[in-house]
Image (cartoon, rainbow, N blue to C red):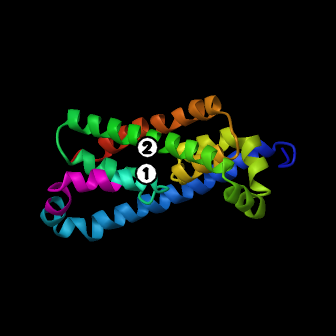
Amino acid sequence: MSSSKYPRLRFFLVNLLKGLVWLSLITGAYILFMELVYKDNPEYWIEKFYSKPGQIYGLYFFSEFCFGLFPPELFLVWAFHKGSLLMYGMNVLFFALVSMAAGVTTYFLGKYLNRVLYFRYFQRKFFVKLMPLVRKWGLFLIVVAAATPLPWSGTCLVVGASGYPLKGFLLAALTRLARFAIHGYIIFQTHQF
């Protein structure tokens, strides 16, 4: 199987691999934090993070709309320690819906920016090779960004600006909800002490 014969598969696998590398780095950082910092003084960290949930929700909202500054898994771990199983499930659903809303909003922002003259100049100057690729392989790009730690909102912005159809975007974006369900379950299973 040559890479020139299956360019979509190659594109998908390369970006999936990048996402998995980032996921591994984030997981490693989390494990190091738990082993080196949290274990020594858990009461301090619990008080610091769990006493102000409004700030955590606000930080998540900001992060999702500003190109995923923090991975959602950190917020899922926070939600697990917040309360009951029902509360955890509601938090996972909330985080998933906010993430989807951020993606759809930035998709439409990309569509709007595509009509702005300055942005079209910027697009022609810097993204002349990228936009045809996004139009051609947008489905794979959306699925990879939805399922991995690649910047979800940034990907949605580029996909919207490329003119990718809304229906295809929304269908592929459902992968984002599956990611939250799977990661929520994994975190639930692995954090039961």
The earlier-in-sequence mark between 2 and 1 is 1
The crowding category of the residue bearing disc 1, from other C-alpha atoms within 10 Å (few below 14, some 14 to 19, many at least 20), is many
Residue 165 falls left or right of residue 92: right
View extreme (front): residue: 117
Query: Circle 2 is placed at which residue position?
Result: 99
Q: Position of residue 60 (x, y in %)?
A: 35, 52
Q: Residue at x 62, y 53 (%)?
A: 17
Amino acid type, label 1:
Glu
Verify CB contact (< 8 Å) between mark 2 and mark 1.
Answer: yes
Q: Nearer the viewer, residue 3 or 66?
A: 66
Residue 164 falls left or right of residue 72: right
Q: Position of residue 20 (x, y in %)?
A: 55, 53
Tell me the number on the disc at residue 64.
1
Q: Is residue 54 magenta?
A: yes
Query: Up-down: is 158 above or below 31?
Result: above
Query: Up-down: is 166 above or below 3?
Result: above
Q: Residue at x 87, y 43 (%)?
A: 5
Report the magenta residues as a range. Answer: 47-59
Per the model, the C-alpha gap separating discs 2 and 1 is: 6 Å
